[in-house]
Image (cartoon, rainbow, N blue to C red):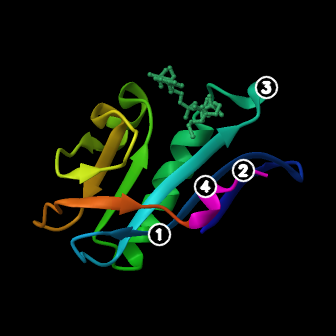
Amino acid sequence: MSLVAECDGEVVGHVAASPVSLSDGTPEWYGLGPVSVLPAWQGRGISSALVQACLARLRERSARGCVLVGEPGYYQRFGFRSLSGLILPDVPPKYVMALCWTDERPQARVGFHSAFAATS
Ligand SMILES: CC(C)(COP(=O)(O)OP(=O)(O)OC[C@H]1O[C@@H](n2cnc3c(N)ncnc32)[C@H](O)[C@@H]1OP(=O)(O)O)[C@@H](O)C(=O)NCCC(=O)NCCS
């Protein structure tokens, strides 16, 4: 899923979400990111609106949870928390943040889409 913020026909912000695989077999989890806003448009709540809209759409699709790699100080405002059971190789645990919409707490390695590993 890709959502954009537009102003006068110009795209000024973007957020993406894509399915992730969890090694314990838990289905219906998604990865949020990247999120970006043009520098001239930052600090006006655009990324917050994009992230909220993206999370709302994931919930409409019966998503069970959402994971991301990001700055805790920024993503905590949306309810994301470090979840000790979720592991992304080579990523410090405090940057692996998740939002659970069920009582499940997966114990799993997270696999993002292979596009995230592209090098060129
Ligand atoms: C991070 C980013 C998406 C924020 O976009 P934005 O539209 O300016 O965000 P908002 O206006 O909705 O929210 C701004 C708030 O986020 C905070 N914030 C922004 N970047 C932050 C960071 N790296 N760490 C902690 N807080 C951050 C601001 O201090 C501000 O807080 P406030 O609401 O308490 O004043 C934007 O700065 C950006 O595109 N950065 C470059 C790409 C990037 O780092 N993306 C995130 C990782 S994929």
Please tell me whether mark 3 or mark 4 is closer to you in this view: 4
Q: On the image, numbered disc 3 is attached to which residue?
A: 40
Amino acid under label 2?
A: Thr
User: For the point 25% across and 52% down, which residue is it?
Assistant: 86
Query: Which of disc 1 and disc 4 is earlier in sequence?
Result: 1
Q: Nearer the observer, disc 3 or disc 2?
A: 2
Give me the C-alpha separation between circle 3 and circle 4.
29 Å
Q: Amino acid at mark 3?
A: Ala
Taking the view exactly as shown, the residue that stands out farthest to the right is 9
In the rendered structure, which amino acid carries the disc numbered 1? Arg
Q: Quadrant of residue 106?
A: bottom left
Which is nearer the N-term, disc 3 or disc 1? 3
| Residue shown at the point (60%, 56%) measured from the top left | 116
Q: Residue 4: x, y in percent?
A: 70, 56
Q: CA distance from mark 4 to mark 2?
A: 6 Å
CA–CA distance in space, label 1 to label 2: 30 Å
Which residue is the site of mark 2? 119
- Extent of the magenta region: 114-120
x%, y% of residue 87?
A: 28, 50
- Res 57 label: 1
Label 4 and label 1: CA atoms lie apart by: 25 Å
